[in-house]
Image (cartoon, helix red, strand yellow):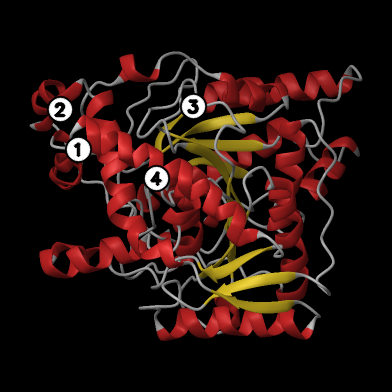
Amino acid sequence: MIPPDPLEGIGIVGFARALRAGRTSAEATADAYLRRIDALDDRLGAFETVAPNAALGAARAMDQMLACGIDLGPLMGVPVAIKDIVAVDGLPTRAGSNVDVSDLIGPEGGFVRMLKRAGCVILGKTKTVEFAMGGTGIGRSRGTPWNPCDPQVHRIPGGSSSGSGVATAAGLCGFAVGSDTGGSVRTPAAHCGVFGLKTTKGLWPTDGVFPLCPTLDTLGLLTRSAADAAVAFAALQGEAEPQPATVAGLRLGRPANHFFDHVDEEVAACVGRAIDAIRRAGANIVEIEIAEAARAWPELHAFVATELVAELGGRDGFESKRRDMDPDVAARTEPGRELSADAYARLRERHVAYRRIGDVRMKGLDGWITPTVPYSPRPVADFDDAALAERLVPVGSANTRIGNLFGLSAVSIPVHHLGSRLPAGMQILCGGGEDARVLAIACAIEAVIGTPPRPNLSGFL
């Protein structure tokens, strides 16, 4: 039997009320999640490291503080899981690799300190694609988590925050932390059927985080709903919670080019029904063009590969580590050895230009609306076919990477309950620095379209 999920049906707000009313305790909640991990994670493989003693000790401390009248806010006692590219004191950080890169990560950084100051209880570290360099979630070095949407077929969880997506979808934590350089929060959110927040570059500190591409790296959250993400975001920011926007009168740009290309029939149908629902609620959906979107894949790939090679110690450092790396990750990183200094400088100039272009294209609009990932979570075995994988991998991040290159804030909202048997997500992109606004829009959309049911996990016992 699977132990109940303490936040199921009540979310972070309901848990906070129950905790302060004495109907539950932080220790009992942490223990319930640890028992769920024990029951399910042998099959799901979401966690790289679980820290039961530290989690229960921190939870007891939260209960004692509350008993003494010290209240740290709405995240106090909420158990969280953290992507294993983020340093946490007392836990190893493997970055999805068999290569020792602890010297590139350093000690616990500012964001984890923010979580702890808010009273979060850290359950452990979740699996990631090696060095966060991959969008499918397939990790040949440390393992590929099993998408909880299908107990019969091992489907990709999305990456690179694969374990965080699986842990959130399976109710193995209150919420999870991920990182997003080209879609690595939004893709697993879409593939696992949960909500994902990609924050604006620079909003949250990335010290103590493995530096895949320092120019583009951002941290984000995977939650069971937009409402939970809004509560967590506000608590971490020390700000008032973003209130849902008014759907009537929203102007959302629907790109006529690129973003709806190569979209699976079921994904297109679910996103279309979501758009129709918010249009009926009074939103104005405006057709737009984003001509630069087609160039985003080669430019982002070159950016990421080049900066990763540099972080690994340059060409010599990369070559010395390559024999111990996931061969797929090594192959994706290889082009970063060859980019000239002049070409890299031009990429940085293009990134600055893209940010200006994004500001111009966003004028007069509240945001852009697109599918998050063009296809549903495919079987992991599909990616053993080199030709098929070569086609699927770039398509998988076709819609998310522009958010990083343009310096935008973004979310992925689950929409598969509108007509797909497998998870699907709808992306909302807003301007840089408009993180509270994108969450307000997401909460409004969630109120219109609802949230999907949780996956049936009985097949994973």
Residue that badge 2 annotates? 318
Q: Identify which amino acid the numbered label 2 is placed on.
A: Phe
The mark that comes first in sequence, 3 or 1, is 3
Camera-side residue of 351 and 332: 351
The structure residue drawn at horizontal position 17% and vertical position 70%, both measured from the top left corner, is 388
Secondary element under disc 1, as helix, strand or loop, is helix
Looking at numbered disc 1 in the image, what kind of residue is underneath it? Gly
Q: Residues within 10 Å of mark 4 (few under 14, many from 20)?
A: some
Q: Position of residue 246 (x, y in %)?
A: 85, 67
Residue named by callout 1: 336
3 vs 1, front mark: 1
Of the residues under marks 1 and 4, which one precedes in the sequence?
1
Judging from the image, what secondary structure is the residue with disc 2 in?
helix
Q: How far separated are the C-alphas under marks 1 and 4?
A: 17 Å
CA gap, disc 4 to disc 3?
43 Å
Residue named by callout 4: 350
Tell me: residue 418, above or below residue 91.
below
Name the element at disc 4.
helix
Q: Nearer the viewer, mark 2 or mark 3?
A: 2
State the count of labels: 4
Q: Amino acid at mark 4?
A: Arg
Between the C-alphas of marks 4 and 2, the distance is 26 Å
Q: Nearer the viewer, mark 4 or mark 2?
A: 4
Q: Nearer the viewer, mark 1 or mark 4?
A: 4
Q: Is residue 42 above or below residue 317?
A: below
Q: Are marks 1 and 2 in contact (CB under 8 Å)?
A: yes
**Within the image, what quadrant is residue 79 found in?**
top right
Q: Which residue is mark 3?
A: 51
- Locate residue 253, reporting x and y percent: 62, 71
Callout 3 amino acid: Ala
